[in-house]
Image (cartoon, helix red, strand yellow):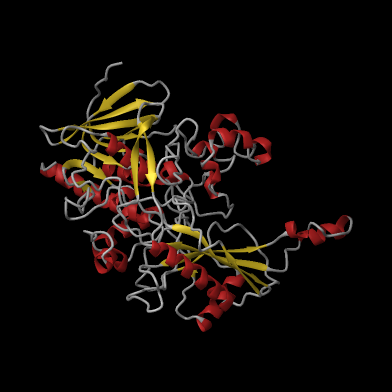
Amino acid sequence: MGTEQHHDFDAIVIGSGISGGWAAKELTEKGLKVLLLERGRELAHGSGYLGEHAPSWKLPYQGKPDRELNATDYELQSTVYAFSSANRQFWNNDRLNPYAMDEGKPFKWYRGAAVGGKSLMWGRQTYRLSEQDFNANKADGHGIPWPVSYEEIAPWYSHVEKFIGVNGRKEGLPQLPDGEFQKPMDWYPLEHTIQDRLAKAVPEITLTNARTAILTEDLPGRSACHYCGPCERGCSTGSYFSSQSSTLPAATATGNLTLKANQVVDRLEYDHSQGRISRVHVIDSETRARSSYSARLVFLCASTVASTQILLNSTSETFPNGLANRSGALGHYLMDHFLGLGAAGMFTDNADSYYYGNRPTGLYIPRFRNVGKQDEDAAFVRGYGYQTMTMRGSWTGQLNATGFGAALKDKLRKPAATWTFYAGGFGECLPNASNRLFLSKSKKDRFGIPQVAFDFQWSDNERAMAVDVQAQAQRIVKAAGAAFVMPIGNSDELSVPGEGIHEMGTARMGDDPAQSVLNRWNQAHDVPNLFVTDGSFMTSSSCVNPSLTYMAFTARACDYAVKQMRAGTI
């Protein structure tokens, strides 16, 4: 079938997740006619489990996993904490859309498969990178210097935070810059007890609210959280930020957005005579029809791995090793955060306080190692933070209760006597050229596109940091007054790369075109109408969740691109 020509748009955005949603919103609000291409299925905000097949409250097998289906179609996706029978339609079908897992070294690639991408089921932890994070590469020599400072991106962090809604507490810590926060979520009594003890025993430790993109105050079209709990199933009230609840409605309201789902981007066509992308080639995943579209601007926001796959597959005489890859850096410097290490403690304090509601986030312990300067006792550079969880057993812990009738029911209503407090570390990964993703030479997907393969392993720095993560977690939980402290995980066995779901860095930005793919505006050095604003652009990883940084850089890149387009330089 030949390629069908279509009317040009002002801009094409590829991917509708966290970055793509923001690109669509910013560009349409600036008056551009935008085509948004999404590989996944159409999904209306507020639709229940499997859309028309069942209401959201009625799940097959009473919500228990369909083991047979998971084994055949969701072998990898079903291993992530957020996957369930209630949201299976959000996730990639591993049978239909595999990647070359048996080539290179293991890496878990978790993928969304619906309009909104992983913004539908992300963890919603929302932090700014600090000045120290932006200076880290230059300071210790790992990676290339960031071309952007914290001072430059700070206004864009504020721009994003005000729109998406982030609840949190200001702490005045240089390693965890404060932002534009809604009121913080309330703490459980035990958490106040722990905070008081930590302040006395380990004053260098700060226990604060996890800064989370979940509303505690209404925003237009979205309601404050009502603490129902299972956020990863999708939030019909829009209380948590997603493209579906926030940026896409804003873009649609302008009248400037055209959204096409089930569109697999095959490649970007480069016109050497014009020095720009001339067309975006796509395949309809349902009909297999091939089409192409043109626009003055192209924003590639398909996710780190998917965007890099597209660029690597977009070869030409000018770019035989991938579009915009003059530096050879494309696909290299892949990063993720390691996790799964920490400590848990059992507490008998606050036994008279009741565990109520289902607060959809925990607390946070910001980085305290190598802050400002290198700690003498640290056998590693950079740092880590802890995400915490506070739990109290309920009637499930009383299953051995004896009795009959009202007396038994009364026993089962009472919560367990003990609380559990868990601190799990997220460690920074250094940028290394040997950590990469590449295209398989022998395997193609059902659309004829080379499958992605990975070659990634943790460095000695991450391994040394992991030992400290676990040791310090035990020290903190003990200082908090736990009656019993238990290490979680094994510092000799780090999480499988990709399990942090914070993949980034494979089309990094930098001032030197010989060492980087993008410039300081997320614009390809050698392809002026191409902008890449998902996690691909990250020059280092910090130790905090990166999604807010993707959003801020996307908004900033859109502002720059439109100004350049109107000035006639793009």
The residue lying furthest to the bottom in this view is 200
User: Compared to 491, does 92 lie above or below?
Assistant: above
Q: Is residue 181 visible?
A: no
Front in this rendered view, residue 283 or 413 = 283
What x and y, as percent, mark residue 207? 49, 72
In the picture shown, does residue 203 fall above or below 412? below
Q: In the shown orientation, is residue 49 left or right of residue 99?
A: right
Where residue 237 sits: x, y (%)? 51, 47
| Relative to 557, 426 lies left or right | right
- Relative depth, front residue between 388 and 183: 388
Q: Residue furthest top?
A: 1
**Quadrant that contains the C terminus:** top left
User: Is 420 drawn above or below residue 535 in the view shown?
Assistant: below
Q: Residue furthest right?
A: 404
Position of the N terminus by quadrant: top left
Q: Residue at x 32, y 22 (%)?
A: 290
The residue at the point 34 percent across, 72 percent down is: 174
Q: Nearer the viewer, residue 505 or 157?
A: 505
